[in-house]
Image (cartoon, rainbow, N blue to C red):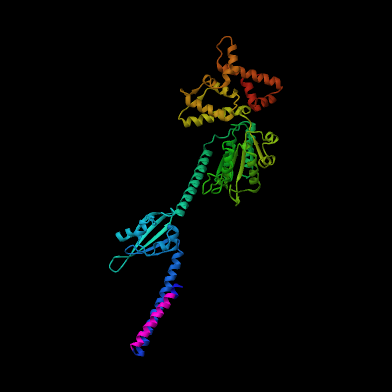
Amino acid sequence: MGKEIKVKLIKQEIDEIYEIIEKLNIKSETMDALRQKFNKVEETYDDFMDNYLDFIEISDHLYDGIYISDGTGRTIFVNDAYSRFTGITKDEVIGRNVLDISREGKLYKGAVTMEVIKRKEMVNSLGKSLVNGKDLLVTGSPIFDEHGEVKLVVINNRDISDLKELELKNAELQNDKQRANQEIEFLRKQQTSKIKIVHEGESMKAVMDMVNMIAPTDVTVLITGESGTGKEVIVDEIYSRSLRKNKPLIKVNCAAIPGELLESELFGYEGGAFTGARKTGKMGMFELANEGTILLDEIGEMSMKLQSKLLRVLQGREIVRIGGNSPIKLDIRVIASTNRDLHEEIKAGKFREDLFYRLNVVPIKLKPLRERKEEIQSLSNEFLSKYNKKYNKSTELEEDAMELLEMYKWPGNIRELENLIERLVVINKDGLIRSDSLASLLDIEKSDIKQYIAKNKDGKTSLKEAVRSLEREIIEDVIKECGSVNKAAAFLGLSQPALWKKCRVLNINVN
């Protein structure tokens, strides 16, 4: 509309010029020449207006705010984005000097127009709108006339609030990725530092046979046994022999994480899913374990609500983040472990029976160490080697001290044995762990050995002899009660060959 008015005004002026020329009696040839000149002027102006309107339309569609002033700081042009970023309307600035606008507090911190005019060079600045608080990246560029003076100043304003948020999101994602990689690398290193499996007894030989069969498959495994019996070591053995050994192994202790947090740790969440949630959201353990293996340790501690969600994961092999709608496909192997009797938990209404059957595809039950006494010597030597290396020592176990270890009941199982060996290595001074120092650390000093020694009349019986005598009495009594060596071996938690060997060493008449 503005262009048409301007063109009409020009035509009116041209017509008025024609009338003046006619009154001056100018020849028709001259008149025609003037008319042609004016027509060209009209066409040129028309093209200019078209280009100008195109420029306005294009500039108003730019993401960046554009501000143009003359060489004195008088505002010539601003686009729509400039008004959007700064909160300043076109009417408030067009035709006005930037200094006047600034004095009224309507500009923004970091304005550079006058600095560009003064320095006659490009100027960059970080700004902030005084109207809406937006963070701006401000770049001012001078345009010079033929004399080298600043003719125009073009200011580019870019809203970097979104850019900062993107950078923050990217930083959080990179931190998540780095954390995940560190966790995975840490877990991988752990696999190589584990104590090797001791399977001298029949029960552990059967366990390792099962491990070798199932490891190359993706079958779900449920490992049960008392705390400290080596469930996690079995998990590591399965993982290290599996086809997923070069992929993540993520271990989640369901008992160590509060119930209200366990769901978000397992499933992850979308940004803003709950109070305190990251804006960018967070990957859960299932996603971190994708293409690898996840261990759900102490599965018996999981709430019934979470058990229902886990059941759906096992059935559909997909998850939905908390606060999300899109399912995420999973390609993982699931291993669960617990020290609870899940059959009793089911009866008590604390564990879902359908989930139990989903997990119990291949059950592996680990016996307590008191029923695997034939492994104590090998395990002790393994732990001695490990902690001698760690603490740069060369500690050894005295023979009668080893017999004490075999006699102890080990309520804490292998974990208790390992902790004891580490403590003995650390506090030992002369490189030999003796029975007296060992007995003082165990309840054995309050047991039958102490009573047996107290009954000895001559007072010269060594602890080693006392242990052997007591062990002989126990074995003889058990064989007598059980009626055979084979049954006695099962009762004592020994293999038959191990008990026969002890009978020969202790000179026990099995007849």
Name which quarter of the figure residue 495 lies in: top right
Residue 397 appears left or right of 217:
left
Q: Position of residue 155 (x, y in %)?
A: 38, 61
Q: Residue furthest left?
A: 147
User: Relative to the observer, which residue lies in front, 227 or 98?
Assistant: 98
Quadrant into which the C terminus falls: top right
Q: Position of residue 444 (x, y in %)?
A: 58, 20
Q: Is residue 263 above or below residue 490?
A: below
Residues in magenta, as a range: 5-24
On whether residue 351 falls in the magenta region, the answer is no
Front residue of 467 and 302 = 302
Quick one: which residue is furthest to the right in this view?
Answer: 483
Residue 17 on the magenta span: yes
Q: Is residue 215 visible?
A: no
Quadrant assignment, res 297: top right
In the rendered image, residue 475, in percent from the top left (x then y), is placed at: 65, 20
Res. 146 visible in picture = yes
Predominant secondary structure, magenta span: helix
- Side of 141 relative to 404 (left or right): left
Residue 316 or residue 40, whichever sits in front: 40
